[in-house]
Amino acid sequence: MIRLVRKPLPESVENKLAGLTAILQNTAAGESRYKKATSLWSSRDSVKKNLREALSDFAAGRNRCMYCGDNEGTDIDHYRPLALEPLLAYTWLNHLLACSRCNSHHKRERFPCDDEGLPLLLDPTVDEPADHLLLALSTGRYVHLTARGEVTVEVCGLNRDLLTRGRQCAYDTMTMLLPQWLHIVQQTAGVDNFLASASPEEGPPALVSAEKTIKGQPFADVLHAMARQADQPGADVIFSDRVDILEILRSPLFRVRFGFTA
Ligand SMILES: [Zn+2]
């Protein structure tokens, strides 16, 4: 799971959501409002198409699930489930893109809260997942740093076998692709200064193509974890067998081109 920056909706879509929310507000609270929310949600395909497009616009890679980062995000997940918060059925801030495995098999209607009623499940558009979860690159498993991290791993099944193996594979893929990226940079000697100030979409076609390939891989959380851990104590141990990768991850050009400057 990585931090994602939610973009505002087009005004026309916001207006549609406001109209649908008004219908729910005018429905008696309780069971009937929940039923109304679920019947509306299952019938309003044009709005969901708008929402899916808007979510895809800031999802990682090629429409990846915002929880696991592996599968295609085919579902619009209600962060606060309809069963608990039917009034939020059409609230943009309550929508996330999720795969059916995370949404329907693992999370379902679960939404654990602490003693003060605050959500324990991480919202990648609000919370910085790396503050709560550490990705062990050697095993592909998430280690929780906080109670919220622990709940998130459990609710979304983030350490399921397919995901841990997929992250290990993604790490191997990155260790193959990053030296190729560096090789292309070195072949275009003299453009380093240009690249450092250019937008990530600008540059020699071969370089832009290589970066698009890297950014389009599933498990964006692996590259994020690599970039983060390269800057932290213990990096020399974590990357002891791949010092070349560590140097790439620490290079200013890599950090600018892949958006790890913050
Ligand atoms: Zn998923």
Image (tube, rainbow, N blue to C red):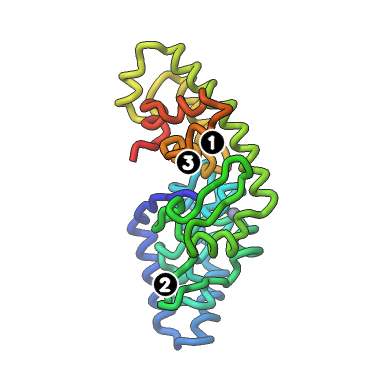
Residue type at mark 2 is: Leu
Choose between 247 and 62: the one closer to the eye: 247
Residue 262 visible here = yes
Q: Name the residue under label 3.
A: 224
Q: Earlier in the sequence, mark 3 or mark 2?
A: 2
In the rendered picture of this protein, how many numbered marks are placed on residues? 3
Above or below 37: residue 45: above
Q: Earlier in the sequence, mark 1 or mark 2?
A: 2
Cα separation between marks 3 and 2:
27 Å
Residue type at mark 3 is: His
Q: Where is residue 46 in the image (x, y as percent from the top left)?
A: 50, 60
Tell me the element at label 3.
helix
Cα separation between marks 1 and 2:
35 Å
Choose between 154 and 8: the one closer to the eye: 154
Nearer the observer: mark 1 or 2; the answer is 1
Q: Name the residue under label 2.
A: 118
Q: Earlier in the sequence, mark 3 or mark 1?
A: 3
